[in-house]
Amino acid sequence: MDFADLITYDGWLWLDAYQLDAKGEAVARREIFVQPAGLIVQRRTAPVEQPRRSRSNMRS
């Protein structure tokens, strides 16, 4: 579905999010219809660990 196809109401918007696996690849997509005024921004308390790349994967 394209964002142009999504009907919204005044004060509402669609959020599109992806669930990532351990390698950072998208494995699932989620859509949610929200009012921005109701959203709460939460900060991470601990840094996110990035997957380590082996030397063989670092070559371009």
Image: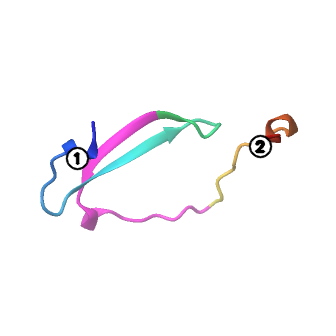
Q: Which mark is residue 25?
A: none
Question: What residue is disc 1 on?
Answer: 4
Q: Nearer the viewer, residue 39 or 17?
A: 17
Residue depicted at x 27% and y 36%: 1
For image coordinates 20% across by 58% down, the residue present is 12
**Tag 2, which secondary structure?**
loop
Callout 2, which amino acid? Arg
Q: Is residue 9 left or right of residue 17?
A: left
Whether residue 23 sits left or right of residue 10 in the image: it is right
CA gap, disc 1 and disc 2 = 38 Å
In this picture, is 6 found above or below 29? below
Local packing at callout 1 (Cα closer than 10 Å; few below 14, some 14-19, many 20+) is few
Region in magenta:
28-45
- Toward the front, the furthest residue is 60
Which element type, helix, strand or loop, lies under badge 1?
Answer: helix
Q: Looking at the image, which residue is at 56% across and 61% down? A: 44
